[in-house]
């Protein structure tokens, strides 16, 4: 822990539709925090590097078929297998910027028609983020950005359903940023929110579990 003086890191999650700009913003945030002297890491879910992650990756690239409930639980298992490392990092002062988390799990699976509360259940007991930022963009606008990678779920009609499921999940604690703004404007707003959150965690805001 560098200038953190024994305080914990913050768990910061970015959520949004595919092509909403999460990954670019996550790397900008990481450079920003590291530049300020904070200990910080960029994580993403699914984490495709693990055994479970490889099954998920194969499913997403349409190289395998799985029952909707089964893949839902694998996405959750992929977070569970990282939980203890996540907690260790946070407790030893490292802030984690996380590109997608449990909210993607619930939004994408419930968009397929799976029961909403059933989708939330396997996430119970995972670490609760200190900050959730939703990069808000109309599905039509995201689709115009092009570059849908051809993975499963990367189709306008499905993304519209996902957007509606995110609306149901969203609560008053979420920060919402209009992701149609220029990338620098989004970045500026994000930096302010993230710094406030990192400071609050340094001052002793306790870690908690899903669902709060
Ligand atoms: N996704 C992601 C889920 O369906 N459930 C989950 O729990 C998570 C974390 O995986 N279209 C979906 C959303 C994305 C896809 O993510 C791959 P990315 O960030 O595009 O690599
Ligand atoms: Mg994607």
Image: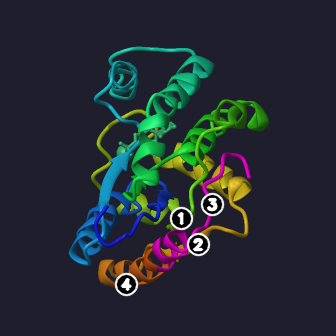
Between 212 and 147, the residue placed more toward the observer is 212
| Location of residue 116 in the rendering, given as x and y in whole percent from the top left corner | 75, 38
Magenta span: 196-212
Q: Residue at x 53, y 65 (%)?
A: 134
Which quarter of the image is occupied by the N terminus? bottom left
**SS label for mark 4:** helix
What whole-number distance in Å separates the C-alpha atoms at marks 2 and 4? 14 Å
Q: Give the residue pinned by disc 4.
A: 188
Q: Quadrant of ligand 2?
A: top left
Image coords of residue 85 (percent x, y): 41, 38
Disc number placed over residue 206 in the picture, else none: 3
Q: Position of residue 113 (x, y in %)?
A: 70, 33
* Disc 1 to disc 4, C-alpha distance: 15 Å
Mark 3 packing: few (<14 Cα in 10 Å), some, or many (20+)? few
| Label 2: element kind | strand
Whether tag 3 and tag 4 are in contact, CB under 8 A, the answer is: no
User: Could you tell me which secondary element the residue under label 1 belongs to?
Assistant: strand
**Badge 2 is on which residue?**
175
Q: Position of residue 12 (x, y in %)?
A: 48, 61
Q: Could you tell me how far apart the alpha carbons at marks 1 and 3 are, in whole angstroms?
A: 22 Å
Q: Quadrant of residue 132?
A: bottom right
Q: Which comes sooner in the sequence, label 3 or label 2?
A: 2
> What's the mark number on residue 134?
1
Q: Are marks 2 and 1 in contact (CB under 8 Å)?
A: yes
- Dot 1 and dot 3 residues touching (CB under 8 Å): no
Disc 3/disc 2 C-alpha distance (Å): 19 Å
Q: Kindly identify the residue that appears in the image at 35 percent across and 78 percent down.
A: 187
């Amino acid at each position: 822990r560098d200038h953190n003086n024994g305080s914990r890191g913050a768990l910061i999650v970015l959520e949004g539709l595919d092509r909403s700009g999460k990954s670019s913003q996550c790397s900008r945030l990481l450079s920003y925090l590291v530049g300020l002297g904070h200990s910080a890491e960029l994580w993403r879910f699914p984490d495709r590097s693990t055994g479970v992650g490889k099954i998920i990756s194969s499913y997403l690239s349409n190289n395998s078929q799985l029952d909707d409930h089964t893949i839902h639980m694998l996405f959750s298992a992929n977070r569970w297998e990282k939980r203890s490392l996540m907690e260790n990092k946070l407790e030893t002062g490292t802030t984690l910027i996380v590109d997608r988390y449990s909210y993607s799990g619930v939004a994408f699976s419930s968009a397929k028609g799976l029961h909403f509360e059933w989708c939330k259940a396997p996430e119970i007991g995972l670490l609760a983020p200190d900050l959730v930022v939703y990069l808000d963009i109309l599905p039509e606008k995201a689709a115009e950005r092009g570059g849908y990678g051809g993975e499963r779920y990367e189709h306008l009609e499905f993304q519209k359903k996902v957007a509606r499921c995110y609306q149901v999940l969203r609560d008053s604690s979420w920060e919402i940023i209009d992701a149609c703004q220029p990338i620098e404007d989004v970045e500026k707003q994000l930096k302010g929110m993230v710094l406030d959150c990192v400071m609050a965690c340094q001052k002793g805001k306790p870690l908690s579990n899903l669902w709060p």
